[in-house]
Image: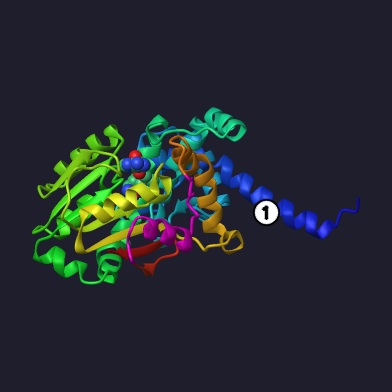
Amino acid sequence: MSIDAAKLNEFLGRAVGDLGAAVSATLMLVGDQLGLYKALAKQPLDSAGLAAATGTHERYVREWLGNQAAGGYVQYDPATDTYSLSEEQALCLADPNGPVDIPGAYSLVEATFHALDRTLDNFRTGKGMEWGEHHPCLFHGTERFFRAGYNAHLLGEWLPALDGVVDKLNAGGKAADVGCGHGASTTLMAKAFPNSEFVGYDYHAASIETARQRAREAGVDNARFEVADATSYGEGDFDLIAFFDCLHDMGDPVGAAQHAREQVKADGHCMLVEPFAGDKVADNLNPVGRVYYGASSQICVPVSLARKGPALGAQAGEARLRAVMEQGGFSRFRRATETPFNLVLEARP
Ligand SMILES: C[S@@+](CC[C@H](N)C(=O)[O-])C[C@H]1O[C@@H](n2cnc3c(N)ncnc32)[C@H](O)[C@@H]1O
């Protein structure tokens, strides 16, 4: 065995960086849930000032600040012994209505620890785990992480990239949001298109309850939410049927596509928003692919395998998704647009 010292140092450097990130994961939740990031976004503070502003204990806050500054998540000014957030850090860490919600994503990480025993069992046996069996932090983290992307892109880029959908929704159409979870995308669209009617479907009853509550809080009265499987909701005649970050999770994605084909109008549209991925493993060996393969092996694949599904995985890629939609009976399929985190695909009858 001959160890190459340069390669060893390079690998250890990477592993220690990752270890720092992993041990800081709970501290991200602490900063979020105790309002530490939000307070720092308002003004530079020392540890005593941050503790006073947030009703927390200074000794813990001082240690948290050291961790955050070492990781590059807050700025430290040694001259004044104060800490602050740059505009960019504040946008990602302290603005839940902004285009990126990094702390929200850490609730997904938390969910993987709650599910560890099941994950071990899944790897040994090939069994699965239903969406609804997860800790509720998964549902809230999913809402927050994905909502940020929808806030940033859905109305301004994704819907306009579909052929004529915005005109139909402005005039007064009917749209379904299948696998809607807490309904972040449904409520956003319903607010933007008050002449149209929106129905959110999800098989997870607790998520549908929350979706109803969110819509009420947003003052939206043109969106309804129903507990239903993607393969069997009762209504049809939709101008648009959307699947946001959920088709790859499903036990029967071809059945869901078939059902959408039956329930969409002859000149209607099906929109798939899916995690960004290339078709080959080698295309996805990058930081975004790493996040998605991680979530996929612990959340998405088990959700599909729990129903003996094909487990497309969060890195399914366009070619596999096209095959699913074509097997479901759609005849036209194209990549409408993309972001670093999402593929936006349009299927038409
Ligand atoms: C990753 S979450 C996405 C939720 C939501 N679309 C969003 O973007 O925030 C996947 C959702 O798909 C739902 N789901 C999975 N399989 C389903 C099925 N067969 N029928 C209906 N909903 C399903 C889950 O309950 C979960 O809410």
Label 1: element kind: helix
**Is any atom of residue 99 visible in this view?**
no
Residue 231 position by quadrant: top left
Bounds of the magenta span? 310-331
Q: Nearer the viewer, residue 121 or 9?
A: 121
Q: Is residue 335 magenta?
A: no
Q: Is residue 278 left or right of residue 139?
A: right
x, y (%) of residue 205?
27, 33
Is the CB atom of the residue marked by disc 1 within 8 angstroms of ligand 1's nearest atom? Answer: no
Q: Quadrant of the C terminus?
A: bottom left
Q: Is residue 149 left or right of residue 211?
A: right
Ligand 1 quadrant assignment = top left
Q: Is residue 164 visible in the rendered structure shown here?
A: yes
Q: Which residue is mark 1?
A: 14
- Taking depth in this image into account, of 331 and 118 the one nearest to the observer is 331
Which residue appears farthest toward the right when viewing the image?
Answer: 1
Residue 328 magenta-highlighted: yes
Is residue 126 placed above or below 11 in the rendered structure?
above
Instruction: Residue 320: give x, y in percent of width and height.
Output: 47, 58
Indicate whether 106 appears above or below 60. below
Task: Name the one closer to the observer, 257 or 84.
Answer: 257
Report the coloring of the rendering.
rainbow
Q: Is residue 249 above or below residue 8?
A: above
